[in-house]
Image (cartoon, rainbow, N blue to C red):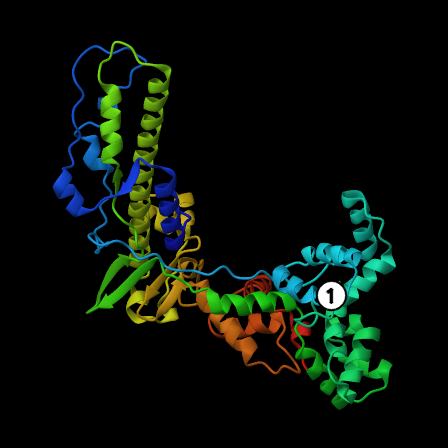
């Protein structure tokens, strides 16, 4: 449960409440009217097959089943469920368009298969020959390559432009050819069709010489290409997610008068074992001369549900304690950042540091940090944001590698794009600023920042 986010744990609790009738939400008004103490079973001898209520509903066990949440303030009112709408998938979006095409039943079936083969980026990675073989082996359809090519062409006319392409070159060409023709776009098509490899390697001089064009003409063509979308499917998903998905922080850390206050952003109710099920178990636990098979099965069912409810309540309780203690340790290490919001105040911190401070295993800290977010006075951050390795500068101070990456990113952003900085030059620049970093380390940090090598950053 540690890896679940706040919304996911709420959904898990709701699902458990639906599936396990022995688990219920606790309400103070019901507790006051009905009482919390379960009746004790009658004394007497019972066979080993009978169920002993005392094993599950002792005076000590019942209070422990209740989950106390000091940060859950609204105990007496029912929780409003957050409405949500299910988004339309990329395949469904494309299929709605595809139905409007004037196609035969066979072509439509081929199209459905092709649409199902489109990946998140919007590509169909399989070649047509392989698709023809798959249709023959899986469905017994004897479909020729030209038939598949005809349907694929129809799919490539759908929105967004570039969908259904077999590779990057195909994707860019599909988009260009759907635009109004201009000299720059015509040249861009020519570059992609005849000099694609040189284009990917940014060998602009080679392209100019081979096509006998000027630098200005190539620059106009490159501008047209840069306006295209290399991942049409991904863009459609991102646009949909931006409208429908929002980050819900798991923690709230407020800085008030130099003090940090932690609260958890989860709408979790108090849970307890159902009193009704406790009474039922109490009845089955009474000494009887003989129990029928149905009564034994019913008793065992109730016992299992009560055990599962108790385990779940304790698991949720332990999860919240672990999350709170781990976040408290992170706050203690990164106190200066939570008070100021300045990235330069972030201290080097690895999983082991938090583990030693909160007393949990490193794997536990890792699970807590996964997919969790914290809201601060300065914005919302993933917990992984606060983890970074350390190194020592020329003055002997231990600094976070995040600070070095920030300098590296700034240098690259400010470089002359016609003559971008190599890793060797970046290494020297960092050394001038007091950070003795090897060239291979610079390359590693650059890759972690998703920044390509100098040759691929070059512009005309």
Left or right placement of residue 248 versus residue 421 in this view: left
Number of numbered discs = 1
Depth check: 131 or 207 in front?
131
Q: Quadrant of residue 445?
A: bottom right
Residue drawn at 65 percent across, 64 percent down: 94
Q: Which residue is mark 1?
A: 155
Q: Secondary structure at mark 1?
A: helix
Q: Quadrant of the C terminus?
A: bottom right
On screen, 305 above or below 153? above
Q: Quadrant of residue 306?
A: top left
Residue 435 seen in this snapshot: no
Depth check: 205 or 124 in front?
124
> Could you say where residue 197 lies in the image, as x and y percent from the top left?
79, 70
Q: Residues within 10 Å of mark 1 (few under 14, many from 20)?
A: many
> Could you say where residue 146 lies in the image, as x and y percent from the top left?
87, 60
> Could you say where residue 297 lies in the image, as x and y percent from the top left?
37, 21
> Could you say where residue 151 lies in the image, as x and y percent from the top left?
79, 62
Residue drawn at 26 percent across, 25 percent down: 281
């Amino acid at each position: 449960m540690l890896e679940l986010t706040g919304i996911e744990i709420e959904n898990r609790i709701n699902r458990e409440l639906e599936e396990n009738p022995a688990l219920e939400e606790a309400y103070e008004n019901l507790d006051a009217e009905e009482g919390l103490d379960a009746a004790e079973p009658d004394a007497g001898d019972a066979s080993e097959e009978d169920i002993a209520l005392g094993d599950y509903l002792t005076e000590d066990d019942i209070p422990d089943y209740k989950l106390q949440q000091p940060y859950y303030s609204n105990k007496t009112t029912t929780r409003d469920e957050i409405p949500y709408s299910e988004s339309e998938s990329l395949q469904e979006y494309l299929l709605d368009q595809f139905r409007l095409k004037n196609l035969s039943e066979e072509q439509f079936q081929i199209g459905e298969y092709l649409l199902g083969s489109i990946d998140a980026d919007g590509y169909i990675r399989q070649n047509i020959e392989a698709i023809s073989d798959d249709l023959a082996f899986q469905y017994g359809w004897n479909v020729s390559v030209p038939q598949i090519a005809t349907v694929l062409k129809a799919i490539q006319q759908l929105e967004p432009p570039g969908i259904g392409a077999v590779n990057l070159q195909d994707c860019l060409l599909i988009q260009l050819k759907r635009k109004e023709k201009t000299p720059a776009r015509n040249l861009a098509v020519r570059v992609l069709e005849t000099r694609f490899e040189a284009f990917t390697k940014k060998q602009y001089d080679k392209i100019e010489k081979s096509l006998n064009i000027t630098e200005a003409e190539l620059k106009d063509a490159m501008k047209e290409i840069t306006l295209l979308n290399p991942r049409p499917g991904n863009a459609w998903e991102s646009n949909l997610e931006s409208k429908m998905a929002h980050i819900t922080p798991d923690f709230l850390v407020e800085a008030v008068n130099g003090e940090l206050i932690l609260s958890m952003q989860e709408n979790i109710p108090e849970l307890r074992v159902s009193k009704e099920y406790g009474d039922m178990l109490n009845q089955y636990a009474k000494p009887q001369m003989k129990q029928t098979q149905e009564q034994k099965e019913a008793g065992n069912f109730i016992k299992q549900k009560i055990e599962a409810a108790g385990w779940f309540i304790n698991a949720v309780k332990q999860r919240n304690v672990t999350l709170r203690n781990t976040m408290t340790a992170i706050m203690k290490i990164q106190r200066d950042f939570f008070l100021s919001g300045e990235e330069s105040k972030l201290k080097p911190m690895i999983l082991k540091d938090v583990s030693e401070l909160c007393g949990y295993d490193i794997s536990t800290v890792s699970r807590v940090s996964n997919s969790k977010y914290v809201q601060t006075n300065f914005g919302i951050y993933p917990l992984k944001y606060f983890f970074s390795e350390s190194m020592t500068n020329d003055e002997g101070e231990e600094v976070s590698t995040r600070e070095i990456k920030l300098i590296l990113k700034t240098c690259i952003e400010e470089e002359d794009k016609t003559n971008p900085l190599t890793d060797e030059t970046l290494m020297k620049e960092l050394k001038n600023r007091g950070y003795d970093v090897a060239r291979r380390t610079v390359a590693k940090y650059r890759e972690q920042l998703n920044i390509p090598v100098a040759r691929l950053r070059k512009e005309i």
